[in-house]
Image (spheres, rainbow, N blue to C red):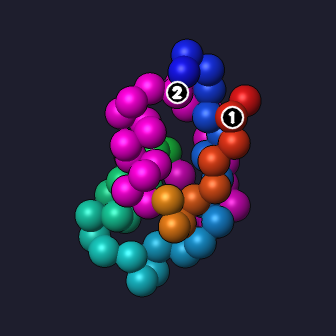
Amino acid sequence: MAGKLKITLTKSTIGASPRQKKVVEALGLRKMHHSVELEDTPATRGAVRKVSHLVTVEEV
């Protein structure tokens, strides 16, 4: 692990549950096609797994 992940919001959160919207917000994603780079930690991986259908992930 110890690297970075580039996380991009590729689908809208309009139909997502309130809990999934909070996870997307906690990851720092605001709008469609907005990307953030976060440390590759188990917590980050768990958050990405919860909204994997809304985001794309690349290892940097």
- 39 drawn magenta: yes
Give the quarter of the figure containing the N terminus: top right
**Picture disc at residue 59:** 1
Q: Are marks 1 and 2 in contact (CB under 8 Å)?
A: yes
Look at 53% across and 66% down and name the residue there: 54
Magenta stretch, residue numbers: 29-51
Q: Name the disc covering residue 40, or none.
A: 2
Which quadrant of the structure image shows residue 14?
bottom left
Disc ID at residue 26: none
Work out which residue is located at the far left of the displayed protein and give it. Answer: 19
Residue at image point 31% right, 74% down: 17
Is residue 25 visible in the rendered structure shown here? no
Q: Nearer the viewer, residue 58 or 26?
A: 58
Give the percent coordinates (x, y) of residue 45: 44, 39
**Inter-mark Cα distance, 1 to 2:** 8 Å
Q: Is residue 6 above or below residue 4?
A: below
